[in-house]
Amino acid sequence: MSRAFVNEDNAAAQASQPVERQVSEQPNYVTARGLAQLQDDVSLLQAQHSDESARGENADKQRLADIERDLRYFNQRLQSAQVVTPAVSTDKVQIGSWVTFADEQDNQQRVQLVGEDQADATSQLINWASPLGKALLGGEVGDEVSWKRPVGDQVIEIVQIEGDG
């Protein structure tokens, strides 16, 4: 049978398949907490999958498909995770460092550089590969760096570096 006919037959079944989550091409550096978070995500999704699958014919097929998609994503992220050494040095900004920086108006902000899956701007957890993360990474106290933002570049000064502890 032609492959085209197989795909046509499956088109209706695939209509409710969720869009796959995009996996970043950047190295998957994670802090120890980021690794634990990924492991927790996988465990929770496995439990949800078991619960939903146990419902048999009454299972919510869309929910099951969403859970399976998320499991594929988080399992891949877990397998590719590269745990970084905890940031203990306060000489240079590294993944895991807490960094306080100031803008031209001397407004200060404190953030921690973390892996992509751990990033949460509302908790001041910034992806190391984001524009802000790239500007800060490798910097030292007193360095002025250029934060490349969509609304225009901004010069910021690294005021303090703290370890991940």
Image (spheres, rainbow, N blue to C red):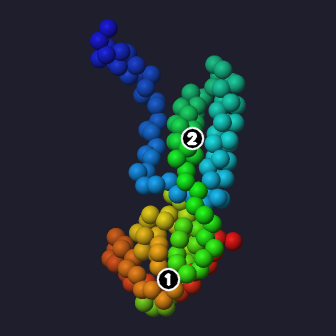
**Can residue 66 be spotted in the picture?**
no
- For residue 91, side relative to residue 15 (left or right): right
Label for residue 75?
A: 2
Residue at 56% x, 27% y: name it: 61
Residue at 54% x, 67% y: name it: 95
Residue at 43% x, 70% y: name it: 134
Q: Residues within 10 Å of mark 2 (few under 14, many from 20)?
A: some
Residue at 64% x, 58% y: name it: 32
Vertical placement of residue 114 versus 109, above or below: above
**In the displayed image of the protein, which residue is found farthest to the top?**
1
Q: Residues within 10 Å of mark 1 (few under 14, many from 20)?
A: many
Quarter placement of the C terminus? bottom right
Whether residues under marks 1 and 2 lie with C-beta atoms below 8 angstroms apart, the answer is: no
Q: Position of residue 116 (x, y in %)?
A: 51, 57
- How far apart marks 1 and 2 lie (CA) works out to 35 Å
Q: Secondary structure at mark 2?
A: helix
Q: Secondary structure at mark 1?
A: loop
Counting residues from the start of the chain, the first of labels 1 and 2 encountered is 2
Residue type pointed to by label 2: Asn
Question: Which residue is under mark 1?
Answer: 140
Q: Position of residue 39 (x, y in %)?
A: 65, 47
Q: Position of residue 11 (x, y in %)?
A: 38, 22
Kindly report which numbered mark, 1 or 2, lies closer to the viewer in this rendering: 1
Image quadrant where residue 8 sits: top left
Image label count: 2
Residue type pointed to by label 1: Glu
